[in-house]
Image (cartoon, rainbow, N blue to C red):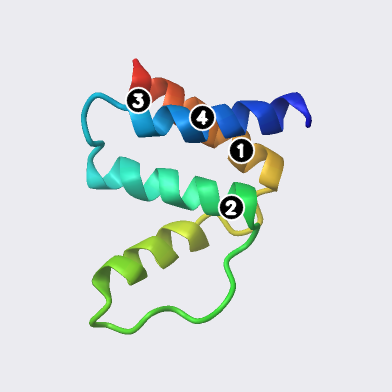
Amino acid sequence: MTDLKAEFAQALKDVKTLAKRPGNDDLLALYALFKQGSTGDVSGSRPGMLDMVGRAKFDAWTKLKGTSKDVAMKQYVAKVKSLLG
């Protein structure tokens, strides 16, 4: 396992230990960075109008389209570290 993947895996564990729940913007950023770092570019169609949470997640992930997995993993690790303080 590369150092980046190890850091990413540790950040996934660390995010579960946050003292307080992050705001919605931070949660969406974490979700999008996680998905981009683990899966790559978004696929599928945008959820319908009544699925507001699904749409927000899809839109946040779509904004990262074209970002490499490595860059997204680095950004995810940095985001978790900033939330940990």
Pick whichever of labels 2 and 4 is earlier in the sequence: 4
- Confirm or deny contact between disc 3 and disc 2 (CB under 8 A): no
Q: Secondary structure at mark 3?
A: helix
Structural distance between the alpha carbons of marks 3 and 4: 11 Å
Q: Amino acid at mark 4?
A: Ala
Residue that numbered label 1 is attached to:
73
Q: Which residue is mark 2?
A: 36
Q: Is residue 31 left or right of residue 4?
A: left
Q: Residue at x 28, y 66 (%)?
A: 53
Which one is earlier in the sequence, the residue at label 2 or at label 1?
2
Mark 2 to mark 4 CA distance (whole Å):
15 Å
Q: Nearer the viewer, mark 4 or mark 1?
A: 4
User: Could you tell which of marks 3 and 2 lies nearer the N-terminus?
Assistant: 2
Residue topped by disc 4:
11
CA gap, disc 4 and disc 1:
9 Å
Q: Residue at x 27, y 82 (%)?
A: 49
Element marked by disc 1: helix
Report helix, strand or loop for mark 4: helix
**Position above or below: 63 against 7:** below
Q: Which residue is mark 3?
A: 83
Q: Which x, y percent locates residue 57?
A: 38, 62
First-in-chain label (3 vs 4): 4
* Res 5 → quadrant: top right
Kind of residue at badge 2: Gln
Task: Tell me, yes or no, whether the two marked residues, 1 and 3, touch with CB atoms within 8 Å.
Answer: no
Check the picture and name the quadrant holding the C terminus.
Answer: top left
Confirm or deny contact between disc 4 and disc 1 (CB under 8 A). no
Mark 3 Cα shell of 10 Å, populated few (<14), some (14-19), many (≥20): some
Residue 56 in percent (x, y) is at 33, 64
